[in-house]
Image: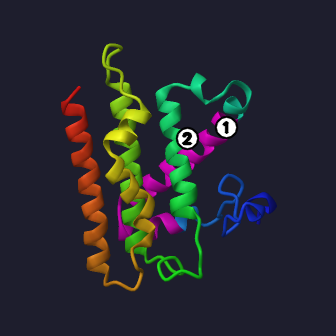
Amino acid sequence: MDKKLAQKKHFPAVNWNDSFTKYDRQLEKYYTRENPTFPKYVKLFKKILQDERSLSEIVQLVGKDSLGEDAKVKLEVAKMIREDFLMQNSFTPHDYNCPIVKTFGMMRNICKFYELSIKAVSATSEDNKMDLARIKKALKKEYVSLTVMNRVAPSLPEEEIRVRLQKIHDEVVKGFQDLTAVI
């Protein structure tokens, strides 16, 4: 348990950079059987959270404005992972439990937003520069949907959870298609 996370009211107060399991290989076999893309999402989440740690040190020294747009995207998605995926409140009807189908869907949606954001900020020219602020403004509704998807009730049937999270995924993809069509 991490005392600093507990002081910040982040529960469970398990530090994602220092905590690990010795059962990665065994669990990976199970999760791959359940959802073949899950290990890829886990690795991407870990990488983003590790990158956030080193980027945070840079931000403290020289400020966030000195970062490139890809680094700003990493910080934003890391925040989303920490606050909207990892943080739980067992006293709410939507957060006391997280069925595996909900976990898969939430991870998939966050990874899709990350991948499309990185692609958008990397593929633009100097004349028509895409940045995180522009993405968040153009995809405001989709961004909010990502930050509240943890509120999908775990008591719903699996298929309904899957459908609701797929809808968010499709809206994110469509939002980026519309955004990049204007560039």
Left or right: where 183 falls relative to 51: left
The span from disc 1 to disc 2 (Cα, nearest Å) is 8 Å
Residue drawn where x is 27% and y is 41% of the image: 176
Instruction: State the image coordinates of residue 131 (x, y, percent, origin top left).
Output: 41, 29
Residue drawn where x is 78% and y is 62% of the image: 7
Amino acid type of disc 1?
Answer: Ser
Depicted 133 relative to depicted 148: above or below:
above
Instruction: Work out whether mark 1 precedes mark 2 in sequence or the reverse, and give the earlier one.
Output: 1
What stretch of residues is rendered in magenta? Answer: 27-56
Nearer to us in this view, 144 or 146: 144
Depicted 20 relative to depicted 180: above or below:
below
Instruction: State the image coordinates of residue 4 (x, y, percent, origin top left).
Output: 78, 58
Circle 2 SS class: helix
List the residue tagged with mark 2: 75
List the residue tagged with mark 1: 56
Q: In which quarter of the image is the C terminus?
A: top left
Residue drawn where x is 33% and y is 53% of the image: 141
Magenta region includes residue 29: yes
Check residue 35 in the rendering and tell me which mark sits there, or answer none.
none
